[in-house]
Amino acid sequence: QLHLVESGGGLVQAGGSLRLSCVADEDHFSLYDVAWFRQTPGKEREFVGMAGRKLSEIFYSDSVKDRFTIARDNAKNTVTLQMNDLKPADTGVYFCAANLGRTWPGTPQDAYDFWGQGTQVTVSS
């Protein structure tokens, strides 16, 4: 059982930055692909980006590409999401999820094995 904990959410003005962290409590964290999702009220949860178990496998959704950066530190069992130039449309609850199977941006959400509880990000205009 992998336990994921997100942190770093908060309230920020448009154009500002936040850095989210997803920390796992298992030393085999490096075996998992890890993705970030977000859910905005009234919308389905959407893929934001992912860091695969291979360090070269980092992908972003088109809506955040060039503004968000994902980094992975397996020694610390952590994946971070650096969010710059935030927009009100980025408001939502951000979740990290881990998948022991191979994962790609189009992988169905129900394929992920473990999810964190989420952290709220609010961007004011």
Image: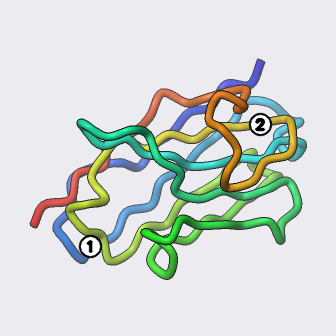
Q: Secondary structure at mark 2?
A: strand
Q: How many marks?
A: 2
Classify 85 as above or below 46: below
Task: Give left or right: position of 63 versus 86.
Answer: right
Q: Secondary structure at mark 1?
A: loop
Which residue appears farthest toward the bottom when viewing the image? 66
Task: Give left or right: position of 108 versus 119.
Answer: right
- Give neighbour class at mark 2: few <14, some 14-19, many 20+ (Cα, 10 Å): many
Q: Which residue is mark 2?
A: 99
Labels 2 and 1: the sequence-earlier one? 1
The amino acid on which the numbered mark 2 sits, given as a three-letter code, is Asn
Classify 30 as above or below 73: above
Q: Position of residue 103 (x, y in %)?
A: 78, 47
Frontmost residue, 78 versus 93? 93
The residues tagged by marks 2 and 1 sit, at their Cα atoms, a distance apart of: 31 Å
Frontmost residue, 31 versus 106? 106
Q: Residue at x 51, y 75 (%)?
A: 65
Q: Position of residue 101 (x, y in %)?
A: 86, 37
Quadrant (top left, top right, bottom left, bottom right) of the N terminus: top right
- Give neighbour class at mark 1: few <14, some 14-19, many 20+ (Cα, 10 Å): some
Q: Position of residue 16 (x, y in %)?
A: 26, 73
Q: Residue at x 50, y 71 (%)?
A: 62
Q: Which residue is mark 1?
A: 16
> Contact, CB < 8 Å: mark 2 with mark 1?
no
**Circle number at residue 31:** none
Frontmost residue, 105 versus 98? 105
**Residue 15 falls in image quadrant:** bottom left
The amino acid on which the numbered mark 1 sits, given as a three-letter code, is Gly
